[in-house]
Amino acid sequence: MLDRFFQGISLGATTLLLALIGVILVSLIIGGSLCLETFGWRFLLSSAWNPAAEEFGALAPVLGTLTTTTLALIFAIPTSFFVAYALSEYIPYFFRLPLTILTELLAVIPSIIYGMWGLFIFIPFIGIDLTSWLAQNLGSQLVIGSLFHGPSSGISVLTAGLVLSLMIVPFITITFKDAFDLVPFTLKESGYALGCTHWEMIWNIMVPYTRAQLIGGAMLGLTRALGETMAVAFVIGNAYNVTASLLHPGTTISSSLANEFTEAESELYTSSLVTIGLILFAVTFVVSGSARLLLRRLSRPGDRSS
């Protein structure tokens, strides 16, 4: 009797969750129908965003979202990897728990705090100096010069990526540390006994053994970064620019929704904002689904190497 009751509750909760996701999806499609009917596929390829002329395009916020998320992962994954390894292997046992708790506390700090810190502290002391140095030293390079071309006030896509990376580092670090803690002590000792250095033991033993968990942690940071709003909105500038330079202001889907939804006066304006929200929903769904399929493949028997 209790088993059937528990199964019924589980089935009902799952059905309710799927229904809620379906309602959200249908609401976004209905809300963005006017935009889709007006612009069609041109909406994805257009960089125009002029509410006065009712010209809208999703290219700038979509590219901004992908760029800032990519930058955040580039900065956050190596940092999280080595911090997690230090917490798991190097730091004395007495200090591991306090430092782990401190890292977990960084994950619960509201995003608006990171945004305010980035605006008032990060941009004046690091954003301006760093972007100026990059523009002067790398802006003239033929290969990567386009990424660091032009002057910058510190409010830029690069600054948004850096602030976003600091936000997701705690999430990835804790996941990586838990993964490293799963590696059997005898396996690590066997590596050292065979003459492995620290790096060889990490790369040839710990990483292959925990690769599914490491990928899962990276995907957790990715999904967290895709939908971040306030921290990015403070430092990215909310400019609908499509440029290769990371030193220029830009925008993302979530920051565009936060900054402009209350200002949308026309029905087409509102529908365009709802449509870019639909795009973010689709991107997040595809990323999460791809991560789940990849993790399922890596967790099959025989796929894990040690």
Image: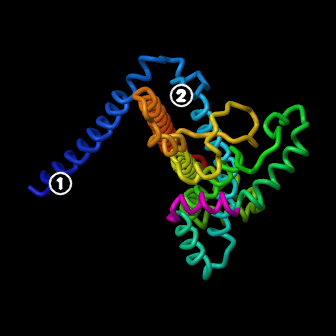
Q: Which residue is mark 1?
A: 6
Secondary element under disc 2, as helix, strand or loop, is helix
**Residue 298, percent across and down?**
52, 42
From mark 2 to mark 1, how far is it between C-alphas? Answer: 56 Å
Query: N-terminal of the two: label 2 or label 1?
Result: 1
**Horizontal relation, residue 33 to residue 211: left or right:** left
Give the residue displayed 81% in from the left and 40% down from the top.
148
Residue 114 within the magenta-colored segment of the rendering: yes
Q: Nearer the viewer, residue 105 or 55?
A: 55
Q: Is residue 128 above or below residue 14?
A: below
**Horizontal relation, residue 166 to residue 129: left or right:** left
**Residue 58, percent across and down?**
55, 29
Q: Nearer the viewer, residue 298 or 81?
A: 81
The magenta stretch spans which residues? 108-121
Mark whose residue sits in front, 2 or 1: 2
Picture quadrant of residue 255:
top right
The amino acid pointed to by label 1 is Phe
Q: Nearer the viewer, residue 126 or 76?
A: 126
Q: Is residue 15 above or below residue 230?
A: above
The amino acid pointed to by label 2 is Ala
Residue at the front extreme of this rendering: 52
